[in-house]
Amino acid sequence: MPSHAAPDGAPRASGAPGPRSTAAARRDEIARDVVGRRRELDLVLAAVTAGRDILLEGPPGTSKSTMLRAITANWGVPFVLVEGNAELTPARLVGHHNPARVLKEDYSAQNFVPGPLVEAMTAGGFLYIEELNRAPEDTLNVLLGAMAERAVVVPRVGQIEALPTFRVLASMNPFDDVGTARISDSVYDRWCRLAVGYQDDAEERAIVTVRTGSDDERLVADGVALTRATRGHPELRRGSSVRGAIDLVAIAHELANLGSYDGADGPDRPRMVLDAALLALSGRIGVDEASELTPEQVITQIWEDHFFSRPGVRRRVPTA
């Protein structure tokens, strides 16, 4: 079995014990760049430090890539992102020879253009494949070979060995099966798997605050509440990630600066939040096929429930 050992100063070899205080200090340093997710961060960090590859399953916007970027930044290795789709062929993943130079010079190692897999291997980085189950089967077979051997053989170039910190990581959204393929047992057998769900209300408010720089706690709370409500709405098959709340709050701040919602009694905050929500959330939700509502109608319902359905709050006057 190939060694997964890392160079001096980086994560230790697979299975080798390390000082507990050093590992905890490294984890705490990485955690400063991640809001919440302490359990998940511990699990991911333990897996990659032990030399293992990991598959993260969960909806979009759940800090999967954020955790990985924080780890690679701490380790000082590249983070190579690849979108899994039908166009991710083996040649795109591994690399190709420059056609113009081949015509002029014939095939050689010098005119080989590395793909993301070879780039990550030679730099000792993390190769992160988003939406793994959208990639073609022959591409996955090439990937599995590289994971097993920590090396790939490129015609007319030779065998390319991976540096010790090279890892293969991937994500999948279990709630979206459009354009996806079934992942075989042999693929699952190569990865450690971690299910990642949405964060809680407090953590999502902290994320929105950090990402927008907003000091308006009420607006942040409204944005997160509206976004979270899309995930359990009976008319929706897909709700919005926290990215919807981030955009909602950012847009609402800019709308407030424009002053278009100012009235004799002050700013019409509910109306401003509604318009920001329509803009930020309508493209991120998926209405159930059996529903007769539009995304805008669903968002308006959620907004009404949030602002006008609490005890002691007068219902708004319906508008066209």
Image: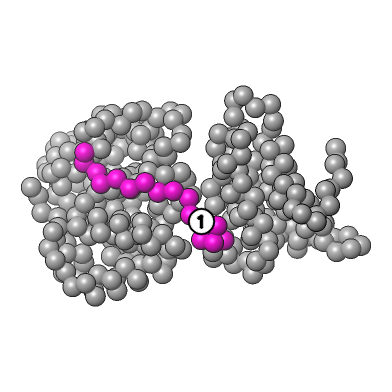
| Quadrant in the picture for residue 69 | bottom left
Mark 1: amino acid: Asp
Q: How is the image coloured?
A: one colour
Instruction: Tell me: residue 222, above or below residue 95.
Output: below
Picture coordinates of residue 185, whole percent (x, y): 24, 32
Instruction: Tell me: residue 25, above or below residue 296.
Output: below
Q: Residue furthest top?
A: 290
The residue lying toward the viewer, choosing from 147 and 119, is 147
Residue at 17 percent of width and 51 percent of height = 162
The residue lying toward the viewer, choosing from 175 and 110, is 175
Q: Count neighbours of disc 1 (C-alpha within 10 A) and say few if under 14, some if 14 to 19, many if 20 or more.
A: few
**Residue 198 painted magenta:** yes
Indicate left or right for 191 with 201 as reference: left
Residue 48 shows in this picture: yes
Q: Residue furthest front?
A: 311
Q: How many marks?
A: 1
Picture coordinates of residue 196, whole percent (x, y): 40, 49
Residue at 33 percent of width and 48 percent of height = 194
Task: Locate the C terminus and report the quarter of the image it occupies.
Answer: top right
Residue range highlighted in magenta: 189-205
Indicate left or right for 67 with 75 as reference: right
Residue 108 shows in this picture: no
Indicate left or right for 6 with 198 as reference: left
Say which element carries label 1: loop
Instruction: Kindly identify which residue carries mark 1.
Output: 200
Picture coordinates of residue 314, whole percent (x, y): 84, 52
Picture coordinates of residue 55, whole percent (x, y): 31, 45
Residue at 62 percent of width and 24 percent of height = 290
Q: Residue furthest right?
A: 264
| Quadrant in the picture for residue 29 | bottom left
**Residue 229 painted magenta:** no
Residue at 41 percent of width and 59 percent of height = 37
